[in-house]
Amino acid sequence: MHGFYGRILRIDLSKKEFVIESVNDDIFEKYLGGKGLASHLLYQLNPAGIDPLDPANCLIFATGPITASSIWGSSRYGVFTKSPQTGFYSESYSGGKVPEAIDSTGYDAIVVQGQSEQPTVLSVHPEGVDFHEGDDIWGMDTFETEDTVIERFGNIGPGSRRVGAVVIGPAGENLVRFSVIENDYWRSAGRTGVGTVMGAKKLKALVFQGDRRRELYDEQAVKDCARNLASEAKDNPGVKAYKSMGTPMMVKIVNEANAFPTRYWSEGSYDRWEKISADALHQRCNVKPHACPKCFMACGRMTTVLQGRHAGLKLVGPEYETIYAFGGLCLIDSIEEIAYLNDICDRQGMDTITAGNLCAFTIEAARRGKIDYVIDYGDVDAVATLLKKIARREGIGDILARGIKFAAKEWDLGNIAVHVKGLEPAGYDPRALKGMGLAYATSDRGACHLRATFYKPELSGMISPDQIEGKAKLFIDFEDRLTIFDTLILCRFYRDLYPWEALGDLIHAVTGLDSQKDALQSKAANISTLIRRFNLREGLKPEDDRLPNTFYKKFQRTDHILRREELEAMLKEYYLLRGWDENGEPTS
Ligand code: SF4
């Protein structure tokens, strides 16, 4: 079928073998590529009930039918596995230049199973894969690893168009449960511990290079889609805002909405927010917009710290989610210090959202006398030390490296631990944005903000944050459309530029498939149900779709609250519209 290579690469690290298999068109017709194909493969190939760190757990890299095309927002890849953080379905996405290198190897998905005896680096290319010893690379941070493997294994052969690598850092090697897979230095497949699965396989890096290109159904129509979008988006205020301020612009917006998680989820606004806002970042640091290939939005911030003890530190970031996690939750009121903590997480290869949540949780544990450890709000050096201890699994760091569920049990703090299914939420408090409560409760990977990005309609006035009845209907419309984004794999921040009709035109131009809204929505629903079945097979219970106690209590300074019955009403509506029973189980 047009838009797909029709083949997957399966790698067995234990036996150092690989096989290239073909994929029937009916799979693409039903699920498209990216998330759709990868979820199908995960469901088919993963043994039921397996430990996420077991060699048989699949680690699947996928690109989509638009990757490496001229489509705006298309330079992304996804990673799919069973999460060591939640024990359920895991998906995580990243941008940068590497998606085009992955795609140039000519597979719709690359499935890694098994476990090496020694640290290993894989070179993936159109003919298969080469296995390299990586003993002397094991222990390097993510930046050193990327430089080393590209220099050592990334010689572009005649005809190769692209080269790129994905890597893990020491945290992934040490099986810290929330380790990331990183590429292009600062881009991460950040959530749910995909880097931990790579570490369990003793796989330090994959280097991709190739010369393949997808054959598209109507090349001219694809070019027209791209040209039209660029001209439509020229004066789009959202595009301008992302380009000029990046995601840190959300600090002001979310703080004003009383949804900015502060002091480990006890407040919805931070009185020192201006010190960690987009303005603070742009005024105090040297910042340039930074874009993935095929992107005019350029949401990334190429930042150089100019002042203070971290002067000279360079990174892409910090993103809004990192600012909320260290700034809001841990009360660190300096954008430079947040950049410093961001850099530690990047080098060690840890998810900044989970890391910030765990540091704030530790602060609460210390304040409540549950642990004998010196750390407090605003103490950036203590937070930095704790991050390094987690990455090395040293002392208290070993407890936190096992994740929030484990730490909460160990310290008898389950009543204040904020997570769903073991994953900590992003920076949108559902007491002020109630639809985010539905998002966190129902997301397959835990408390995720990205499956429907429902903060967008609630913050923009499209729907009242307090509305309960009818909310699930709009939520599903967002979730389904963004599921289709993930089958392609298309950047979230283009969500306003690809409404259903534009998405349908694009998919038709790429694949030739009928892509009316109804057909696409039914594909998205099939994928949601497939993943639901995967999670049920792994032991999902109705209580896993519920929220932590904290969200049912008022903030200390304002009256915002989410009531249990409000979540129950939204959930009931959501299950019904999905065609699931009252326990969230598919009925057909
Ligand atoms: S909007 Fe940001 S994340 Fe998305 S493609 Fe552009 S630079 Fe990459």
Image (spheres, helix red, strand yellow):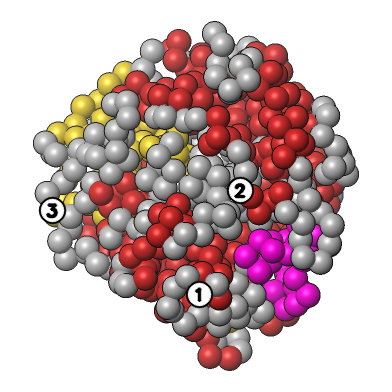
283 to the left or right of 463:
left
**Given contact means CB atoms under 8 Å apart, are the residues at marks 1 and 2 in contact?**
no
What residue does disc 3 label? 118
Reading the chain from its start, which is encountered first: label 1 or label 2? 1
Instruction: Tell me the residue at 78%/75% (across/down).
Output: 271
Q: Which residues are magenta?
A: 254-282
| Camera-nearest residue between 129 and 587 | 587
Q: Is residue 531 above or below residue 496?
A: above
Instruction: Tell me the residue at 47%/59% (across/down).
Output: 412
Say whether mark 3 is within 8 Å of ligand 1.
Answer: no
| Camera-nearest residue between 138 and 185 | 138
> Which-is-in-front pick, marks 1 and 3?
1
Residue 369, which numbered label? 1
Residue 131, which numbered label? none
Q: Is residue 298 above or below residue 114?
A: below
The amino acid type of the residue labelled 1 equals: Gly
Residue 548, which numbered label? 2
Whether residue 71 appears in this view of the structure is no
Kind of element beneath mark 3: loop
